[in-house]
Image (cartoon, helix red, strand yellow):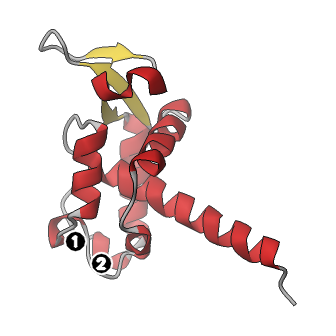
Amino acid sequence: MVSIDSWWNGNVRDRSADVLELVLSAMSDDYSNVAMIMESINEWDSFHGPETWPARKAIPVNWREVVHALHELTREGYAQAYLLDTGEAQPAKFSEESIRDLWFYVTPKGMGAIKQLYERVPDLSSTDY
């Protein structure tokens, strides 16, 4: 019999992976801040991928989940934080304290992950990214 702990851990891990995929995809075409990423995910349309994309089961996402995903993605080199105050993107260090001032964009490593994701999900391979 499956224990409640293993069931919970499996579902949380799956949701976390789904949120990482959704966040990475949401910022793949332009610099995005947390609010824009949340809006892009929570107001999903067919431009962002088909109804059959497994990660969509995590929708809706909340602020905390997006911030956590951004922290992980920047820490692992899939995304980069930026300051856009001067009109020019200046790389910045991820900081929850200044999260409202930061913008995010995928790195080449992140774009490679998106391409792999789109290849893994057949209906996504026909979507432009």
Q: What type is the residue that disc 2 sits on?
A: Asp
Give the residue pinned by disc 2. 123
102 relative to 13 in the view: left or right: left
Q: CA distance from mark 1 to mark 2?
A: 6 Å
At x 47%, y 50%, the residue is 65
Count of numbered circles on the image = 2
Residue lying furthest right: 1
Q: Indicate which disc residue 126 carries.
A: 1
Q: Is residue 9 visible?
A: yes
Question: In the image shown, does 126 or 64 lie closer to the viewer?
Answer: 64
102 relative to 15 in the view: left or right: left
Quadrant (top left/top right/bottom left/bottom right) for the C terminus: bottom left
10 Å neighbourhood of mark 2: few (<14), some, or many (≥20)?
Answer: some
Question: In the image shown, does 26 or 121 lie closer to the viewer?
Answer: 26
37 relative to 76 in the view: left or right: left
Q: What type is the residue that disc 1 sits on?
A: Ser
At x 45%, y 22%, the residue is 97
Dividing the picture into quadrants, the one containing residue 111 is top left
Q: Are marks 1 and 2 in contact (CB under 8 Å)?
A: yes
Dividing the picture into quadrants, the one containing residue 91 is top left
49 relative to 77 in the view: left or right: left
Dot 2: what SS? Answer: helix
Residue lying furthest top: 86
Q: Is residue 94 visible?
A: no
In the image, residue 45 sits, relative to residue 34, either above or below, namely below
Question: In the image shown, does 33 or 64 lie closer to the viewer?
Answer: 64
In the rendering, at what x and y percent does residue 100 appear? 31, 28
Dot 1: what SS? Answer: loop
In the image, residue 2 sits, relative to residue 27, either above or below, namely below
In the image, residue 56 sits, relative to residue 42, either above or below, namely below
In the image, residue 42 sits, relative to residue 99, either above or below, namely below
At x 54%, y 39%, the residue is 72
